[in-house]
Image (spheres, rainbow, N blue to C red):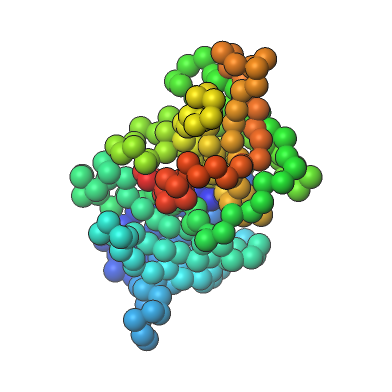
Amino acid sequence: MFAGTLTKNATDAAIAFAGVVHSAKFDIAIQLEPRAKMSEKSPDFDVTATNRAGRQVRIDSAWNETSKTGNAYLSMQMDVGLGPFRVNAVQTNDAKKAKSGEFDIVPFVANGTMKSGSLSGELTAMDADNAFAGYVANMMFDLEFMLIENSWKTDANHPDYRIEISSPRGTPIRVGSAWMQKSNRTGNEYMSLLINTPDGDLRVNAVQNEEQRGGKTFSIIPFVENGTDDRIENSGLALVG
């Protein structure tokens, strides 16, 4: 459950990138400082931040990476005292076209997903902007979120919506993706959601029962494998895919 921005520094060789990483628990300014590589797999950067005493401290590492599509991005691992977490810094299509140094920090998707199990949740269509407000909860977490239309969608496999929460300072944090789907059995439309939670990547469906059909409210239920969601597995939480 992380988000943020990273900007390439063109004036200070000692600081390659500077930015901010957000979560539901913190908003922290970070810097990426180049380091000598000892091997091909060693980090390209030290990730540093300023602690409460004003001391600059190393909070872990970052690597230059290239995706299967040939796009360059940054893979980062950090620990701010709550345990290590991983994020990627990627560029939107607009940023790549403009050849800007702006990157968006998005969650890293683990190979596995958590079991949705017993949970409750609801999704309600808003009156404007084709957006939805909702929540999903169980005994371990209670997450309120928004579904915002994905303006970067350029391919059928890309998510229809991005899932966002707010940091303590009100910064939107991308925590997942949602796809519009149609049931092969009934022909009814529903939404498939992939949400990054503190306990792992959660997959759920938002469906309408007979009483809800035609209205604005959907019930969130545990994900059921039906062989129609290959594109969700392949797309994950990538910013545009």
Establish if 27 lies above or below 191.
Answer: below
Residue at image coords 66%, 35% = 221
Looking at the image, which is closer to me, 159 or 187? 187
Residue 156, by quadrant, is top left
Q: Is residue 225 visible?
A: yes
Q: Nearer the viewer, residue 142 or 138?
A: 138
| Residue 56 in sight in this render | no
| Residue in view at x 55 percent, y 20 percent | 125
Residue lying furthest right: 139
**Horizontal side of residue 54 vs 72, given as left or right:** right
* 19 to 215, vertically: above or below: below
Q: Is residue 12 above or below residue 154?
A: below
The residue lying at 38 percent from left, 69 percent from top is 63
Total numbered labels placed on residues in the image: 0
The quadrant of the image that shows the C terminus is top left
Residue 162 drawn at (x, y percent): 47, 37
Is residue 97 positioned above or below 85 on the image? above
Q: Image check: 30 left or right of 115?
A: left
For the point 79% across and 45% down, the residue is 139
Give the image location of residue 59, x and y in percent: 53, 69
The foreground one among 210 and 117 is 210
- Quadrant housing residue 222: top right
Q: Position of residue 5 (x, y in %)?
A: 42, 49
- In the rendered image, residue 13, in percent from the top left (x then y), is placed at 29, 69
